[in-house]
Amino acid sequence: MMRAQGGVRFGPILLLIVVLAGLAGVGFWWWREHNREYLLRFQPKVGDTMRYFAEMNMSVQGQSMQMTLFFTQKVLKVQQKGLLTIETRFDSGSLKTNGASAPMPMMPPDVSTYRPNGQRVKAGQVVSPIGQFTEIGYPEKPVKVGYTWSERQKSPDGSAIEAEYKIVGRERVRNRETLKIAVTVRDVSDSNNPLTIMSGHQWVDLNGGILVKLDAQFHQVRMPMVGTMSVQGSFKVNLMP
């Protein structure tokens, strides 16, 4: 009988030990994940083909627009120093404006060269918020969760776009190990009045550095001769199986 009573007295203590051990395990996992280093590199192989589905919904001053687009990227060549030649082909799509739908006008394939850090090699590029959001230039060094960096585009007319990136953490997306990156794009043409245009996240494959998923929200836009306008909408891109 006394042994039974002893069991009752020690039960809560044993339970506490188990709970503390579990918390210690969680704490170690959190510490390990936040101190793990990742070196992001854009390095798909020759012949690799990635098919994507993109969807955009936008509303500006009572005008609405919805766009859907299927496009394919194929690695044509990998040069010395890791430069990649990639063809982007626009397969099909539709555009709906204020309820009226029409097929998306197709463009010829685009062939561009990319650096191993994911940046496109091009001259005289146009300042593009969506371009800054989608084409991240990866850091040259290994980074940890919480690391932030930024990039800026400036055009001859004085307009400037700045994108800020932050490593959020590691996630498994559709059977791929990815790194989740928070992205904020601002119009910094007026340094005294920066304007947040887009914000959201990218999920990047840890093995090849390719985009797996993108989810962005539109906020505002600054138009010449018009000023600042509020924008409601979203932009999503998903890698297809």
Image: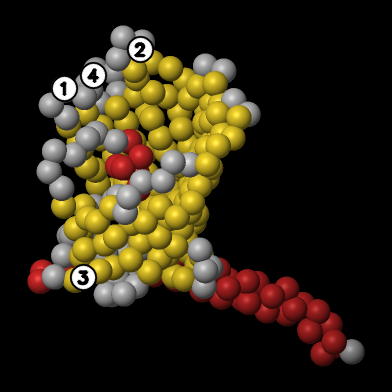
The residue indicated by pointer 2 is 227
N-term-proximal mark, 2 vs 3: 3
Q: Which residue is situated farthest in the right direction here? A: 1
N-term-proximal mark, 1 vs 4: 1
Rendering quarter of residue 63: top right
* x 42%, y 24%: residue: 220
CB within 8 Å, label 1 to label 3: no
The residue indicated by pointer 4 is 190
Crowding at dot 3, Cα within 10 Å, few <14 / some 14-19 / many 20+, comes out as: some
N-term-proximal mark, 4 vs 2: 4
User: Residue 39 or 102: which is nearer the viewer?
Assistant: 102
CB within 8 Å, label 4 to label 2: no
Q: For residue 157, which numbered disc appears in the image? A: 1
Rendering quarter of residue 114: bottom left
N-term-proximal mark, 1 vs 3: 3
Question: Measured from the top left, where is residue 238 in percent x and y?
Answer: 49, 56
Secondary structure found at label 4: loop
Q: Amino acid at mark 4?
A: Asp
Q: CA distance from mark 1 to mark 3?
A: 35 Å
User: Residue 154 or 111: which is nearer the viewer?
Assistant: 111
Mark in front: 1 vs 2: 1
Q: Looking at the rendering, in which quadrant would you find the N terminus?
A: bottom right
Crowding at dot 4, Cα within 10 Å, few <14 / some 14-19 / many 20+, comes out as: few
Q: Relative to residue 92, is residue 86 drawn left or right?
A: left
Crowding at dot 2, Cα within 10 Å, few <14 / some 14-19 / many 20+, comes out as: few
N-term-proximal mark, 1 vs 2: 1
Q: Amino acid at mark 1?
A: Asp
Q: Amino acid at mark 3?
A: Lys
The residue indicated by pointer 3 is 77
Mark in front: 4 vs 2: 2
User: Residue 189 or 120: which is nearer the viewer?
Assistant: 120
Image height of 153 relative to 175, above or below: above
